[in-house]
Image: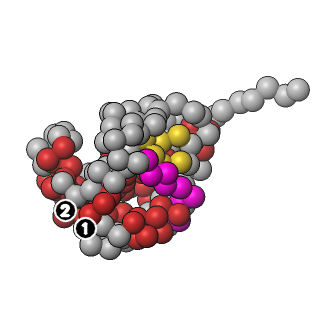
Amino acid sequence: MVHYENLNSDSIKELLSHYGIQINCSAPGVAIPHSFWGTPEAGRKKNRLYIRADTPIHSILHESCHYICMPEEQRSLPHVDAKGSAMEENATCYLQILLADHIDGYSSSQLMKDMDAWGYSFRLGSSYAWFTQDAEEVLQWLINQQIINSQSIPTWKLRDTYFESRPLNETILKPHR
């Protein structure tokens, strides 16, 4: 398992800065604020990511990708749980795999090993099998949300709105005032 202290922190900060995410690093032995899973896992509140030196990189990327993939109105809420759909959770996992290759000294291959070691659960077993054989719908969702392009390259954009759960033929009416 690779931790924040094992890699170049500038590389991680630079990656996350593309999305307006700021890292707050707690001292050793101090509980990490806003962590859904508890210390040493990353915590997030709005665009602030809370970590320690012993926070796993997969956790840093996962919480960051939740922020990237959630709808705009969700990002400003103060809760710890991302409260996303199954598609958002899968998109978070897929995007963190893509972003791992943008961290000096780390890779998507290492991230998937760390995900499996931590206990991420996928229908086909390993994160690699899921990523390469069972994530076409997730890939298309990320492209449709303009989070990545058709070559699976990050656009460095946050998801804008929450259209994914509405049928295409559904019209949303707002009352006139």
Residue 124, percent across and down?
A: 12, 44
Horizontal side of 24 relative to 172 (left or right) equals left
Dot 1 corresponds to which residue?
107
Q: Callout 2 environment at 10 Å: few (<14), some (14 to 19), or many (20+)?
A: some
* Pick the front one: 137 or 13: 13
> Looking at the rendering, in which quadrant would you find the C terminus?
top right
Q: Which amino acid does label 2 sit on?
A: Gln
Quadrant of the image containing the N terminus: bottom left
Give whichever of 139, 5 is nearer the camera. Answer: 5
Vertically, is 15 above or below 51? below
SS for dot 1: loop
With respect to residue 102, does 77 lie above or below?
A: above
Query: Which amino acid does the dot numbered 1 rest on?
Result: Ser
Q: Residue furthest right?
A: 177
Camera sees residue 69: no
| Left or right relative to 161: residue 131 | left
Q: Where is residue 174 in the image (x, y as percent from the top left)?
A: 75, 29
Indicate yes or no whether the magenta region holds residue 83.
no
Q: What stretch is highlighted in magenta?
A: 18-26
Instruction: Please give left or right for residue 150 compared with residue 136 in the image.
Output: right
Q: Mark 2 points at which residue?
A: 110
